[in-house]
Amino acid sequence: MAADNLPSEFDVIILGTGLTESVIAAACSRVGQRVLHLDRRNYYAGNWASFTFNGLLSWIEEYKAQQELPSTKSEQGWNDQIEDEEEVIFLSSVDSSISNLEVFSYASEDSEDDEQPKAPQMDKAAEETNSCHTEAQDTDSFDSCTQSDSDPHNPEGNEQTSKIQDTCQSEEDKKDQQPIRSPEQPLEVKKKITYAKLLKEGRRFNIDLVSKLLYSRGLLVDLLIKSNVSRYAEFKNVSCILTYHNGKVEQVPCSRADVFGSKQLTVVEKRMLMKFLTFCLDFEQHQEEFQDFTDMPFSEFLKRKNLTENLQHFILHSIAMVSQDAPTNTGLKATQHFLRCLGRYGNTPFLFPLYGLGEIPQCFCRMCAVFGGIYCLRHSVHCLVVDKESGKCKAVIDTHGQRISCSNFVVEDSYIRDEQRAQTTYKQISRAVVITDRSILPSESDQQVLLVTVPPLEPSSPAVRMVELSSSSMTCMPGTHLVHLTCSSSGSAHEDLAPVVSRLFHVPNSCKEECVQGSEENEKPEVLWVMYFNMRDTSGLDNSSYNLPSNVHVCTGPDDSLGSDYSINLAELVFHQLLPDEEFCPPAPNPEDIIYDGDQGEGTTFENDAHKEGAVIEGEDEPQENKEQVFSSEPVQDSMGQEIMTE
Amino acid sequence: MVSWNAANAHRKLCNQREQIPRLREGPNLSSRLHEPSGQTGCACSNTLSGVKPLYSIIVTMEDYDYLFKIVLIGNAGVGKTCLVRRFTQGLFPPGQGATIGVDFMIKTVEIKGVKVKLQIWDTAGQERFRSITQSYYRSANALILTYDITCEDSFRCLPEWLREIEQYANNQVVTILVGNKIDLAEKREVHRQRAEEFAEAQSMLYLETSAKESDNVEKLFLDLACVLIREAKQNTLDNNDSAPMPGEGKNINYLSCCNIN
């Protein structure tokens, strides 16, 4: 906390602490580069950050303040540091990557009834449950669908669906009893969560601006393991994949156990699905199966394979997670990737970092610092100093007017001014963050992490991806759930996502008096607080999109996909541009393997670290793989027959 | 020498425990990444009944009953790294710079027959410009908040550090305030009583040390280990599923060991 001056010379200066920049910082520092890593904000990870509830409110305030006065005040005092043969390139001092931010709070503003249970307050509770809904029509059909859709072939229903139906049944029975307590709710009285409570417990939230999951065999997980950065973080498995289908939320059968255990699928469907997934696992070996379809959309391919409508939905939207018009090859690759990630760590292909995704860039920053990287938040670069002759950036002037020389400069996109851009129109990502009072999937455990895919509600609307987090992921307070919705924008975040929010959740609104059929609304999780915003998606841009010196490398922001492969690929690419001959993130030594030289403090030697680490990971991975690898091609056909027979 | 109010500290722990969410998801998530499989608190609670500790140190042991993550914080230059190196290696490197490539240091100690592995994390220099990552605080069992008794400024920054702790550390974390550099008594700027009062007001433990003379350094870590063992033991008694706090997640390398659902 001392007001030190920064050193005046570095190999690499990195501006922005998002995932890509942080990985580059760690990689450079790890191989001995002198790294200065700066961020203008007072927190790490930029648009990848996670905030406590109160932190998020400050972030919102900052956004509003910036909208009001987007002034760029230029500081003087640096002119004398520029020589004749140099010119300057100014950086932007405002971040305009966030737009259309809207916040709605539905949690009670009362502070008195903070601790009061809901049930004894009959008046209040009745009022709540009676609150009407703009989409009463929809919700009616939602309910009837749930009823009519119960599969006649499987009267017991699978675990999840049966619960949903039970609930509906009991709703029917007790229609006039208010408030209704659904059977899976704990018997103790549910406490009402007020806004004051959200604020008071605000530090229990870690709300991500970017919502992504880690594919268990994706580039990020591989990198975390390879580099030993994984030691700084803890993870939780995504417990279940759901999809919004036929007006209700259904579980997607993705592992072999799921497929055979599924009561939604007919025996024929199970066989079909297993056969198709087995084919996808090594589809390259079976050219003949798909070569005629390479120019066609994957959705068409699925149709031609005579898969039922149910199966087409599951594969297209929840397994491949591609759009209707994605080419067959893309769909097959995505399906294969999904299947390969299954069973490495759990029942689904995904992991989620405890305390939120914002931890991950920080973990790489820690690695950078451990290898001597210097960190300074609340500190930015005012301009680049470019040598006229070579056209290269040789130094920067920081926001304190200090000149710092460097051989390479890495910068996040949002620090670049429009003058340096070839184009200023961007794709956008639509985001919603919802705090709800219960899980969308009623079950015994309310401590799950769920991925829900929501296909376009209207033909013109975007496919939405939803991640529901529970307090066990250390991202929200107990008694609440944190739901992230993400899609590629077609309109503003509110336009894109509000219809999905009101379809899947109960959004309390003003006309509390009129509506009577609150009962099925009561079924859905209630929205306590929701925020919508758009984030600029610069992932399509490359070097040619910027007019900058060749040793200035721009890191584009987060993309709209579920995994982080894009950002990791970019980090590796930039790293190899900077240091073509160096290894990207070799394993950091395990502290337990470091042998200290008895007399000398500095003299530390690393013993055989790379080998040892690798062995440990392999060893732990293999047995699991054998046990859980679900679609391992050979035995499936045989045992499938058996399993179906025994049903 | 030490204003170590163990009873007070214990009360603090008990109070905090009530606010901690309990994990109800099943036994698979209850084993923390550090704990060797099959060796959870349960096994130890039998052997550990009295709490009067007897210290002894074993140098290298691969097996242990408990592993605790201890995190050092405090202004740059107060001697955090020296404390760790004095304890783990018995060294006092004068005028040493940052230790490149060393993430944390490890020392296994035995306290009354219980083997405790201490994993001691240093700031990696990120405190210099007040840029410590939040993830640094996560899942720490104990925090050692250090200041320099010869530097008033390092003492005045303590409230800022406490705010960070409050914000990012698990609320069950044990915090101890350490005034380092008592070998430089003639240059003392922060009076002992002042520090004691401050620590008491914040319900922290307090200890003064000299990494250079090795005064109280061992005591610091061993006393901390005792408190952590007691806490872990208490947790085991409180809930039979012995879910260790904090952080019920897993290190990525260990995740594959567990059998999920």
Image: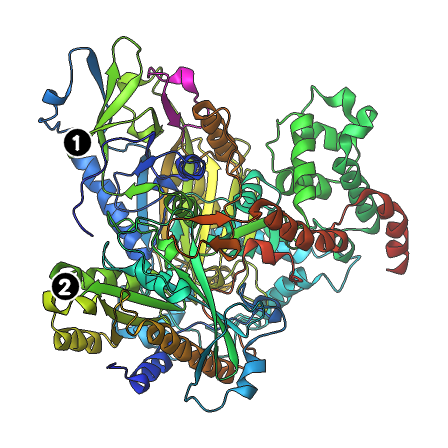
Residue at the far top in the pictured view: A389
Residue underneath mark 1: A402
Badge 1: residue crowd in 10 Å (few <14, some 14–19, many ≥20): some
Residue underneath mark 2: B150
Q: Against A228, is B160 above or below?
A: below
- Between disc 1 and disc 2, the foreground one is 2
Highlighted range, magenta: A538-556
Q: The residue under label 1 is which amino acid type?
A: Gln
Residue A552 is a magenta residue: yes
Q: Against B233, is A389 above or below?
A: above
Helix, strand or loop at label 2? It is loop
Q: Residue at x 60, y 74 (%)?
A: B39
| Residue A632: % across, % down | 79, 45
Chain assignment, label 1: A
| Residue A111: % across, % down | 25, 70
Q: Against A163, is A305 above or below?
A: above
